[in-house]
Image (cartoon, rainbow, N blue to C red):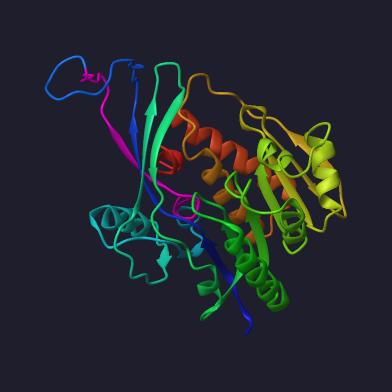
Amino acid sequence: MAVVPGLVEVASNAVLDVLVRDVRAVDEPARDGWGANVQVLARPVDVALGGCGAAAAYVLGRLGQRVRLNTNLGGDAWGQMLRGWLASAGVELRPTALAASAVHLIQLSPEGRRRSYYYTGEKVVWSATLEGELPAWYLAAGYGKVDAEDLRELEGVFARLRQAGTMVVFDPGPWFKGRVATADMRRVWGQVHTLVATEEELRQWWPAADAEVLAKELLDLGPAQVVVKRGPEGAVCGEADGGVWRLPTTPVAGANTVGAGDTFNGRLVAGLCRGEELRAATGAALQLATQAVRRGRGVLGALD
């Protein structure tokens, strides 16, 4: 089956992020009744569209890209809220028959340190992407429920898509570490067109002296492109038949970084799908991710 020009499919989780700011550390044990166990908040509780799949798909849709999402949305009230945000961005959803959606409660201290509570929801069925129209670009991202079976399934999906002519982008995230063998992860990287992850995440699988060396050595494993996300230090990107570039960004002090990586991924894939050079697409992804951090509302604020 031929690929559909201009169609991007994103495969990963969808999560309702509930953000509670300025939470002080509490040493006292939990107890019944109203008293020292209750913190009165000075700032409102925010809810946001999260999940490595849903958030990146939302950004792609808001950028005017035709995008389809293969995810783990439930039919509960949280899922309906998430569906509404995705529909507002024009995201097409593969049907699911799941009951409960994933929810991530994030507590931020006044200093910006994070503590979270995460119900991961159900699994994403990666092979569903092979049903119906095949995308021109495919972004798959790890999430909290992945294991060795997910990596095996993804390897098969990547191989089928690459054979059909789809450009595969893979962000393993931190979740596969300790759940799959290093040799297996490195082998899967050879099946992808663009490998993207944070420097810390990539170093778990391939130690290197610095980010530029890391990108160069990962390109030798088979990807045509490697993008190393470096948070407030920007990014490094490189191509197998080209150079390696270090791109800076402007740090945002004391900001909420939730959704920054997904905003980055969405803009990166949008640029690549439209024919932008890797260096230009990475630079634009950095700018949009920094904007999302500055506005503090995750992907929902990135393009407002």
Indicate left or right for 10 with 116 as reference: right
Res 296 seen here: no
Q: Which residues are magenta?
A: 37-59
The residue lying toward the viewer, choosing from 259 and 217, is: 217
Q: State the image coordinates of residue 166 (x, y, percent, origin top left).
A: 67, 71
Indicate left or right for 113 with 17 as reference: right
Q: State the image coordinates of residue 177 (x, y, percent, origin top left).
A: 63, 46
Pick the quarter of the image with the N terminus.
Answer: bottom right
Rendered residue at 38%/55% (across/down): 121
Vertical position of residue 263 compared to residue 192: above or below = above
Rendered residue at 46%/55% (across/down): 13
The residue lying toward the viewer, choosing from 220 and 118, is: 118
Q: State the residue lying farthest toward the left.
A: 33
Vertical position of residue 254 compared to residue 289: above or below = above
Q: Quadrant of residue 118?
A: top left
Indicate left or right for 225 with 166 as reference: right
Q: Quadrant of residue 106?
A: top left
Pick the quarter of the image with the C terminus.
Answer: top left
Rendered residue at 45%/27% (across/down): 114
Indicate left or right for 115 with 232 as reference: left
Res 204 seen here: yes
Vertical position of residue 86 compared to residue 25: above or below = below
Q: State the image coordinates of residue 147 (x, y, percent, origin top left).
A: 57, 56
